[in-house]
Amino acid sequence: MAQILDLKGTSLPSIQIEKAGVRLKNNAGDLQVKNSADSAFTKVTASIHESTSDTGLVINSDAASTGADWKITLARPTSGQTADYTLTLPTSAGSPSQVLTTNGSGVTSWTTVSGGTTNGQLVDTTALAFNSASSVSMFTLPANAVVHRVEVIIDTPWATGSATMTVGVSGTTSKYAGSNLIDLYGTAKDIYVSTPGEIANASAESLIITYAASTATAGAARVLVYYSNPG
């Protein structure tokens, strides 16, 4: 009799599947799946997940919506769709700066953006602060990409000391911008520009800011790298 009452939901707030198994329970009209101790959520495994609403998947639904804790919602268009379709994701996570493209039938793949023109240039921004530790990682420059321009924008001038910075790679720290081109002690909104003129590297490069803080007590800047991907 107790088992029948449990299934009807009249004696317990949850149904346990097998001894020490997961629990199904109701919470304000929502179905929850908890572990055997009813102390934490547990995964649900199924071959197909179907949703009858336009909002099909919410990731981190209990997010605080502050700081770094926000939810992501995947949904279909509310109007304009004329047929069913399937999107098939690529077999890997892709390479830096690649974009997701489709073959027109829903099969997606990672594609390298063609560069070589001003409008085709990409830009990466890295923040630098007076108390940053050297070296500061920037981004991975794709193989055969060309760096056209490096800008250092002073947001807050450095105070005290003789801090310096360069932009390059491990072993060649001034490859794209040398310390003699950049004055961290200038005035706010000063922009220091380097046009390195380096040929494309056949291998990907991890760009870094090599920074010497000295005794700086204030200062903030942005480092922008303009580059084009191989076409």
Image (cartoon, rainbow, N blue to C red):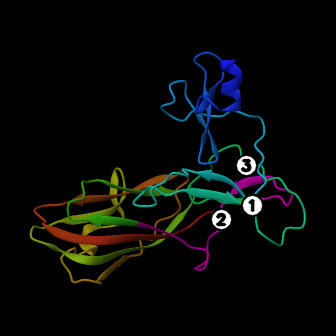
Measuring 61% from the left and 15% from the top, which residue is drawn there? 19
Disc 1 packing (10 Å; few <14; some 14–19; many ≥20)? few
* Residue bearing mark 1: 54
Residue mark closest to the camera, 1 vs 2: 1
Q: Secondary structure at mark 1?
A: loop
Residue mark closest to the camera, 3 vs 1: 1
Q: Position of residue 45 (x, y in %)?
A: 69, 32
Residue 80 sits in which quadrant? Answer: bottom right
Is label 2 in contact with label 3 (beta carbons under 8 Å)? no
Question: What is the number of the mark on residue 89?
Answer: 3
Instruction: Report the Cα–Cα distance between label 1 and label 2.
Output: 32 Å
In the displayed structure, does residue 224 sit left or right of residue 11? left
Please state the extent of the stretch shown in magenta in the rendering.
Answer: 102-125
- The tag earlier along the polypeptide, 3 or 1, is 1
Query: Is 118 one of the magenta-colored residues?
Result: yes
Measuring 55% from the left and 62% from the top, which residue is drawn there? 145
Instruction: Please identify the quadrant where the C terminus is shown.
Output: bottom right
Disc 3 packing (10 Å; few <14; some 14–19; many ≥20)? some
Is label 1 in contact with label 2 (beta carbons under 8 Å)? no
Q: Position of residue 23 (x, y in %)?
A: 60, 29
**Would you place residue 75 above or below residue 46 in this image?**
below
